[in-house]
Each structure stands twice: as structure tokens, then as C-alpha cells.
Image (spheres, rainbow, N blue to C red):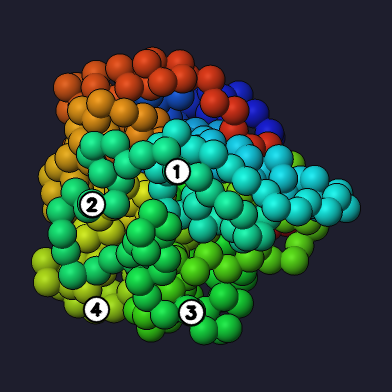
Amino acid sequence: MMTDDADADLRRLAGDAKFRHRDAARRAVRFRESGDVADLLAVNDDPHPCGMTEVLFALAGSQRPWLNWVPMPSEAVSNGANDAGARIAGGARLNSIRIALSAAEPASAMVAARRVMGDFRAEIGSFPEPDIRVPLRRGRYAVWRYDGDMPVPAVPAPSAEAVERLHEVGGEAWASPLSGYVQAKPLGELPLPDLLGLLAHLPEPPATPRWEHLAKSTPMYWYRLMQPWVCLGLLSHAADEPWAGSTRRAVLTDLALGIEDWVADAALFALVTAAYRDPAVRTEVRDLVRARLDAAARAPREVTIELSLARLMLITPGSTAADHALARQCIARIAGDDEPAPRRSRWWQRAR
């Protein structure tokens, strides 16, 4: 029987001499204490894999960014949209909304803000170098283009079926990346244009009590959460194709190294999930996460996804001590390490 206290549950299992996965539980306890991704990998690589392995992995990552929830949006436009959206949800009528930004912010945040509070006038002070509109590496796949200062989708809108499937799959955060991958497989069955369309056209949240409640406080969070779900779907798209030449690898890599946007770290999250599942891709994925984090850390301006990239680096299989040192420097410089996790029940409790 599991409780709401992941640390107490793991300590109890680690101390049970009759528990078959005692060593994995001990490594999970160590990960909770030190954050060393090698311990989390040891849980994943349990020599006796079964359903309990996934429970231990989920306990190890409970209430940890990316392992159990998506970092909150931090942009100025996101904060403004959360405030305005909450007022609208409470019955207020807002006219002629104007948001002044000292510098450009991610395309996804700008478009999500319009979903939350309707049309608004954005006054963007500048596009400082490195220009947020320029991809880190140009590739075949992209979901955004710019019409002057404003981002617009570069792909067609998704089908109604695709939106319905996203609502069915992605209504809450994952218990862990591993279970999230399995849960997102129905998304992977969609045509590629639908998946890309979901990333850029940002459909509204499902009409459930959870999202009706969050509309009154943090309506932007749905749009931050849904893109990683879509990228997990991309990870299982055309899964019969060998990884090296696969569509899923090409799309996720291009998005990860595309423009500076929520889509980039969502794609990297899916690739990190692939690295947990397949040791053969770990070096490649580590290099991609480090390249994106390096670009953010070098920028002489604020990069709003830098904090989430740093936290993703800390849980990337194959990451090095130098990677972790850079990630912790970024976290300490930006925010310390006190970002609160959304409060919610465990997946095995919801399943009862």
C-alpha cells in the first residue's frame, strides 16, 4: 500500500529485506537525496523489471520537474495572461488589453496568451541577440514562422480527432516519463501533420473540473503541459522505423534545435524519455540537451526556458558532472531551487 509520502514509501521498501526490488528502492532513496541521475538510471535498469519497477521510478521522480510535472511558464506575457485569464474566468470583461514587453518572448507563450485572454496588443521593445526567431540549427521541420514581430503557425491546424485524442491522453501530467510514453501512444498513431498542428495551434484545454478550476488561477499551464504530451506522441510515431533514419528522430531533433521556444524543451523532454528507454541513444540525446543549454547559458539576455533546460539536463541519462555543474549554476543564478510542484494525486491512486 502506497501513501502520499514518496520518501516514506521508498524508505519502507528499501528497508524491507523481503522486498525483491530492495536495491532499486535504495537507489531511488539515494536519488531523492542527491539528485544523481545515475541512481535514477539504476532504478530504471532493475535486473527484475516488472510493474513495480515503474512504481519505484515514479516514486523516485515524484514532485520533481520533468519527471512528474512540467515547469510553470515564467514569461512576462504568461504572467499577464494568467492574471487576465483568471479575471475573465471570474466574470470580468476586459477590453483593449495591452502588454508591453522589453524583449521578445517565446512564440508558444505569445500564442497561448491569445488563447487565454483573446486578442491583445503586444508592444515588443526589441529582439536582442541571439534573435529568438532564429533556430539554433536550421532543419526540415518547424512549427512557427514570424510575420514581422509576431509568431504564427507554420503548419496547418490539427483535425478535431487529434484535439479529442490530446484531451483524452493529456489531461494531467504523467506519473513518470516512462508511463507517459505508454500513455501517449494513441497520439503517436495520428498523422504527422496533426501532431505538428497541435504544437502550434494550441487547442484549448479539455472541459473538465480540473481545467475549469485552473482557468481561475493559472490558465496558461495547459498550453505548457500539452506540448510535451504531443512530443511524447511524436516519440512513438512510425515506431517501426529504425531510429537512425526515423521520422520521429528527425522531427524531434529539428524541434529541439529550432527557435527558442517551449516546443524546443518539450522535444528535448521526449528525447530524454527515449534515452531512458534505449541506452544506444543516450550520448546523442545528452549532446542535444547540452547544446541547447549551452546556447541559453551563453546568451547575454534572459532566456525564459533556461531554467527548465537546466532541470532537464540534471535528469538526462549519460549527462556528466560538468553538465550537472553548469545546470546547477543556471538554477542558482535564476531561481534557486524552490519552484513549487503542482499538487495532485498519484497515478496508482487515481486508477483505483
Left or right, residue 67 beside residue 327: right
Q: Is residue 340 above or below residue 337?
A: below
Q: Sequence-wise, which precedes: disc 3 or disc 1?
A: 1
**Res 158 label:** 3
Q: Is residue 187 above or below residue 314?
A: below
Q: Sequence-wise, which precedes: disc 3 or disc 4?
A: 3
**Res 134 label:** 2
Label 1 element class = strand
Residue extending farthest to the right is: 91
Circle nearer the viewer, 3 or 1? 1
Q: Amino acid at mark 4?
A: Asp
Q: Which residue is mark 1?
A: 124
Q: Amino acid at mark 1?
A: Ile
Q: Amino acid at mark 2?
A: Val
Q: Nearer the viewer, residue 172 or 146?
A: 146
Label 3 element class = loop
Disc 3 crowd rating (10 Å Cα; few below 14, some 14-19, many 20+) is many
Q: Alpha-carbon distance for marks 4 and 1?
A: 45 Å
Circle nearer the viewer, 4 or 1? 1
Q: Alpha-carbon distance for marks 2 and 3?
A: 25 Å
